[in-house]
Amino acid sequence: MRRADRRGGRRAGTQGGSRRPSYHHGDLRRALLGAALELVEREGAEALTLRAAARRAGVSQAAPYRHFRDKEALLAAVAEEGFRSLTEALLQAAAPHAGDPLGRLRARGLAYVDFATSHPAHFRIMFGRGAADRSAHPELMKAAREAFEALVSGIRECQDAGIVRPGDPEELALCAWSATHGLAMLAVDGQLGERAVHLDALAQAVTASVFFGLGQR
């Protein structure tokens, strides 16, 4: 079986015009996800196709169809991975602030901006114009919902502590997310100009303003 895998790997590498060693089948999905991210980061989302991902991964043009039926399925898988990483980053950022609901909420906002600027390709695939239709991909929808819920739970904690005013926590979370996401997208798209040098301070200012607006009236 091992010998057959090696023969298949050489054929795939030859057909795809690989500039990398061929991947074993067990690594194919991971390799294609990585190739998709590299393409978006270097050439933009418009350059991403299954064929281009196969070339960059060093496999045959037919190989991606073992895991992804089309380009949107590949986009959905990359976006799902991104949302799961984002959720982990938000929860990890809040963890050191036990007993401080507002500190936990602000930490999540700062972590959101940091994730976007640290993973711009993922961020564009998650939220860009060519993003996959979440309603057609239940696992992607679930991952996106879990990321949003990390913010909603932070709002609820602050409401319970009397820091954030009463109201629908999802609606208030959407308000906070809109401002934080706007800053993150401006940074990722290079629209902040000289202000980008002071992004950390800018993120602090934006999150402070957001949470001031959420406070008790």
Image: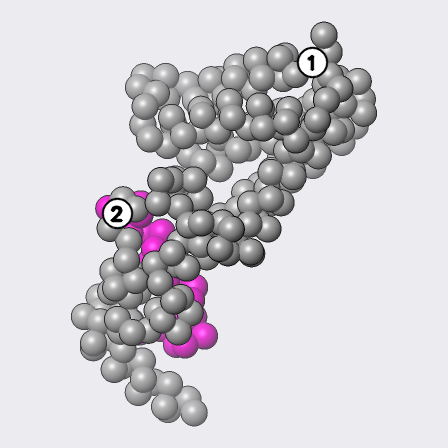
Q: Is residue 10 magenta?
A: no
Q: Is residue 85 visible?
A: no
Q: Is residue 28 magenta?
A: yes
Q: Residue at x 51, y 51 (%)?
A: 135
Query: Looking at the rendered structure, which numbered label has been put on residue 94?
Result: none
Q: Secondary structure at mark 2?
A: helix
Q: Disc 2 marks which residue?
A: 46
Check the picture and name the quadrant holding the N terminus: bottom left
Check the picture and name the quadrant holding the C terminus: top right
| Rendered position, 56 above or below 114 | below
- Outermost residue toward the left? 17
Q: Quadrant of residue 145?
A: top right
Q: What amino acid type should be assigned to the residue bearing mark 1?
A: Gly
Residue 13 place in picture, x, y as percent: 25, 75
Q: Secondary structure at mark 1?
A: loop
Q: What amino acid type should be assigned to the residue bearing mark 2?
A: Glu
Report the magenta residues as a range. Answer: 21-43
Query: Looking at the rendered structure, which numbered label has been put on residue 215?
Result: 1
Mark 2 to mark 1 CA distance (whole Å): 42 Å
Give the mark nearest the N terminus, 2 or 1.
2
Q: Tell whether 87 sits left or right of 12.
A: right
